[in-house]
Image (cartoon, grey):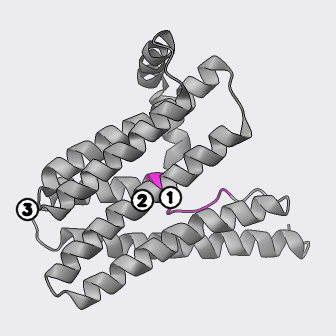
Amino acid sequence: MITEWGRRNLKVILEPIAGVFRALHITPNVITLLGFLLNVVAAYLIVIDQIFWAGIVFLVAAGADAIDGTLARQIGIRNKFGAFWDSTLDRLSESIIIMALTYRFAVAGQVWAVMVAFLALIASFLVSYTRSRGEGIGIDVKVGVGTRVERFIIMAVALLFSGLYENLLLIALSLIVILAGITVFQRMWVVYKVTHGLT
């Protein structure tokens, strides 16, 4: 997955930045909160039709999301609340961005686009839920073509380049629906195989 590629190849960038936050005694949970607040700003920029700048802030927020985990590993923090906090704010961040896009579609009277946005939100949540539920019954369910990293890349590209093509945001959400939907079925299939002794 792209997630694993990123962890391997971006380590040389993330480690020094995380080291700066460590020297400033800033905790991973604070950085996670900062990332969420930046996503709130990005959502506001979407609402006021500053889509390109929303994309820039969205990218910075993603950087914060990557650094918090790196910093936690540097410090040696592996507490359950940190993981819970990170996952919860990740879901809220993704939701608020899609909510802002939904608002734009609704104001423009684009009913079908609103429905697609809702489907993207549902599919994204199901990707996380199926992994969490699988792990809850002792099954590792990390497979999928539409994990959070892939969805982030799609959204970032759409926000940054929507000025070049007006339907790019709708296309991005549609692609998220498809890839996240496929991921949900991939994870359901993994759980089915393991629980039925097919692996």
Q: Residues in magenta?
A: 142-149
* Residue 20 seen: yes
Pick the front one: 182 or 21: 21
Q: Which residue is disc 3 drawn over? A: 164
Tell me the amino acid under the disc marked 2.
Glu
Return the disc, 2 or 3, that comes first in the chain's sequence.
Answer: 2
User: In the image, residue 26 lies at what x, y percent?
Assistant: 49, 21
Q: Nearer the viewer, mark 3 or mark 1?
A: 1
* Residue 66 seen: no
User: Residue 94: which disc?
Assistant: 2
Snapshot quadrant of residue 157 = bottom left
User: In the image, residue 10 lies at what x, y percent?
Assistant: 44, 29
User: In the image, residue 180 lies at what x, y percent?
Assistant: 50, 70
C-alpha gap between disc 3 and disc 1: 29 Å
User: Residue 91: which disc?
Assistant: 1
Q: Is residue 46 above or below residue 119?
A: above
Secondary element at image label 1: helix
Could you tell me which residue is drawn at 77 percent across and 58 percent down? Answer: 135
Secondary element at image label 3: loop
In the displayed orientation, state which residue is furthest to the top. Answer: 23
